Amino acid sequence: MRTKHRIESVLYHVLICGFGFIMIYPVLWMISGAFKNNTEILNGGLSLIPEVWRWENFVNGWSGFGGISFGTFFKNSLIVAGVSTFGTVISSACVAYAFSRIKFKGSKIWFTAMLCTMMLPAQIILVPQYIIYNKLGWVGTYLPLILPHFFGQAFFIYQMMQFIKGIPRELDEAATIDGCSRYSIFTRIILPLLKPSIVTTIIIQFYWKWDDFMGPMIYLNKPEMYTASLAIKQFADSSSTTDYGAMFAMSALSLIPVFLIFLFFNKYLVEGISSSGLKG
Amino acid sequence: MFLPASFTLGESMKDGNDMEKQRNFKKFLYSNNTAGYVFSLPFIVGFLGFTLIPILVSMYYSVTDYKLGQEANFIGLQNYLDLFADERFMNSMKVTVIYVVISVPVKLAFALLVAYFLTKQRRGVTFYRSLYYVPSLIGGSVAVALVWKTIFSRRGLANAILAGLGLDKISWLGDPKTAMGILIAMSAWQFGSSMIIFAAGLKEIPTTYYEAADIDGANKFQRFVKITLPCLSPIILYNLVMQTISAFMSFTQAFVITQGGPNDSTNFYALYVYNHAFKWSNMGYASAMSWIMLIIISALTLIIFKTSKFWVFSESDS
């Protein structure tokens, strides 16, 4: 009986690991591709370990195109993703607090509006937004990529609301008795307790913005303003013979921030994803 | 004449007045209505400025022949009539629907299955969950789309594997069926976030349900169908709605890997809108397209919610 159990257990782990390996094979293949040259990549070597470790791919890739190095592109990505994440967190937390804790006239209408926005795909308003930004002269700047995030984002507002629901109302009441206003309840009670949800928002929003491709492609027109994801695509298209090794090297580099965040904040991320839209 | 009242009044009165004003202001500031609007102001401004106004603007442009840098002329419903006569548009609707109808259920089934196997009390489950989440984490990026494109190129990894098995090479991206298949596979590959949501839901199901079923002699399959699925149905609904909407709008993968080809077989809706709006600058036409999409997605979401009454189990029903 015991051996049967053990065999079953080993089988389970082998199957799960094997399948997992297949799942992340393309990613591993990309990383190993960062150290290969074109012939090795294009002749479809299955091997994940390159014969020669070609570090020069990183040097070639880093030099970028048009005299602009990938350092600039990564810096741009960091600015766009960083600032818009900051805006999302601040504004979404305020709105989530208003919707979940304060009863005010019209709150139901605005809440419904928020739910509708959550289910409205961004691409639907892409065209009119572009027309408006174009008239305002914002095309070619970072404004269209950053500014809208300072006005709350429905998905995160909803997620934070779910979290605030779990904070006991007795805390608010006790604070009110101690003389706290609606404002100080937010800064002294809700905001500190909201930390896990804020961390989740930072992670998810940061990597959404970091990976965003359509936005930068539409709004940015000067290569020196390109974000990393746009630059990688341009790099792949720029010459007739793509340097695949260099492209993979830069691709791998561009995924590093996302991986680091994932490694360090894994716990928050899993909790955050599972709490978004579950109860309620 | 228009001097402030306090100016003409005595000092003591002025103080009293100010204090009352201050008190009134404080009362106003600290009232629920004010605080509510102060905190929700970002959303209200954003909703009006970045959602509602653009939607109305697009309604206007959808009845014009607006091109960037030119005057917009009112042309009535011409754009809509043209759209329904536009074979490429009808085709893009068709391929988008095919993509959504296949990729979403495959992805969710996959997510549920893996989540089900990973909730067992075994060592390393957390690690495995992270492992299976990796494709979702990075799958939306251009970097990974380029990797897939290289893998399925003529001399790429996929063909090398086929050759190794002694099979003929396939022109993966040159054949409409395989091109679509690759995009569907890539979407199913990113089942991670749905899986995590399912896993959390599975944890919430009281074990007493399963124990009771065990006593009644239910087998594993029966337990899955009669307990797991109904208990999970609200979460399935949530995942279904969110994934359907995002699948309808998928852009990056098709844009990078197939560019809509071959023969428009993967010319997804978002891609076609993009081409009209930003490649050919037919803003009016693209606005009309966005409106049709908005109507389709709203109708679809409504249908899913309406039918959910019949298959989503909620605690209050019992």
Image (cartoon, rainbow, N blue to C red):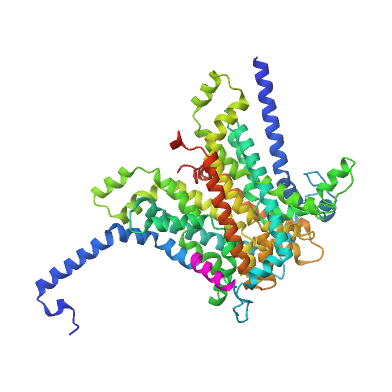
Q: Is residue B139 magenta?
A: no
Residue A92, percent from left and from top: 45, 56
Residue lying furthest bottom in this view?
B1
Residue A268, percent from left and from top: 51, 44
Of residues B238 and A28, the one nearer the viewer is: B238
User: Which residue corresponds to the image point at 57% horizontal and 75% vertical from the top-left?
Assistant: A134
User: Which residue corresponds to the image point at 15% horizontal and 79% vertical from the top-left?
Assistant: B7
Of residues B315 and A136, the one nearer the viewer is: B315
| In-image side of B123 versus B26 (left or right) | right
Which quadrant would the C terminus of chain A be assigned to in this image?
A: top left
User: Which residue corresponds to the image point at 68% horizontal and 62% vertical from the top-left?
Assistant: B271
Which quadrant would the N terminus of chain A be assigned to in this image?
A: top right
Residue A210, percent from left and from top: 60, 57
Q: Which residues are magenta?
A: B50-62
> In the rendered view, would you say A205 is above or below A133?
above
User: Which residue corresponds to the image point at 44% horizontal and 55% vertical from the top-left?
Assistant: A112
- The answer to whether one can see residue B315 in this image is yes
Q: Is residue B57 magenta?
A: yes
By secondary structure, the bulk of the magenta-drawn segment is best described as helix
Of residues A223 and A157, the one nearer the viewer is: A157
